Amino acid sequence: MPIPDSFACIEADVQDLRQALLGHPLYQDLREPRHLLAFMEQHLFAVWDFMSLAKALQAELSCVRLPWRPRADPTLTRFVNEIVLAEESDADGVGGYASHFALYLRAMGEAGASTHSIERFLEILGDGSDVRGALRDAEVAPWAARFVTTTFEAIESGDLVTIAASFTFGREDLLPEVFHRVVESLDQQTGGRFATLRYYLERHIEVDGGEHGPMARHLMGAVCSDEAAWERARLAARASLQARLGLWDSIHAALDRAAPAPVG
């Protein structure tokens, strides 16, 4: 099967999941600041684990070990290094640099969302725990823990095809324009409380646009050498999107239980 057709076949195969995510009722039900805070507190784990996925891809497509050795495809090395550069040290909107994860944390602090769960999780990781143990001991919400576990199953497979497919088909372009409008509306209602979140979303639109779409296609064509590899890519793409849909469904179901937002 020709490479372009193979990529298109995966896009067609996961279209049902993408449409379910892009048209999810969660977005329409983010009607109050407290709902958006509840969303951010769980979505943060998807922001965090994306960095590990990007780093796993960087470890395969560039050289991060000593002694340095050149990689076979410098175009892919450039692609992954550009992504990591933006994700790990992007312009922060106030004259400095920050990772997108740090930007999201700042947005949460600005808005009044709790960061206790992620901070406890990172503290436990820093003490030497593995990811699953840290998720358990930090008492991370089960739906966020399932999502992160799925990502790390892809990473721990050590299969470049699986990692690349999870990265290419299952990530942050799944926040549609309707979500941006919700954030903009709530930001205006609250006098700029979600300004940093708006900036974070704008940066993602900028970073994900342009060359990254065509380069993702090139990435998949480079790592999938035969029909068996394309089938692994298809399975990984569906697993990643199914995990995201499960996260969205669970957050949506929990919205009505969200605590009122802090005043002030």
Image (tube, rainbow, N blue to C red):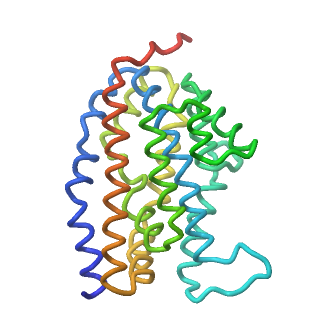
Q: Quadrant of the N terminus?
A: bottom left
Residue 223 lies in quadrant = bottom left
Q: Is residue 16 above or below residue 143?
A: below
Residue 7 at x, y percent in the picture: 30, 75
Q: Is residue 182 above or below residue 233?
A: above
Q: Quadrant of the C terminus?
A: top right
Residue 140 at x, y percent in the picture: 53, 33
Q: Residue at x 39, y 69 (%)?
A: 213
Q: Residue farthest to the top?
A: 263
Residues 240 and 210: in front is: 240
Residues 264 and 246: in front is: 246
Q: Residue at x 20, y 66 (%)?
A: 12
Q: Residue at x 37, y 64 (%)?
A: 236
| Horizontal relation, residue 129 to residue 169: left or right | right
Q: Is residue 139 above or below residue 70?
A: above
- Count of residue discs: 0
| Horizontal relation, residue 104 to residue 70: left or right | left
Residues 166 and 217: in front is: 166
Residue 151 at x, y percent in the picture: 48, 54
Q: Residue farthest to the right?
A: 67
Residue 226 lies in quadrant = bottom left
Q: Residue at x 31, y 68 (%)?
A: 234
Residue 102 at x, y percent in the picture: 64, 43
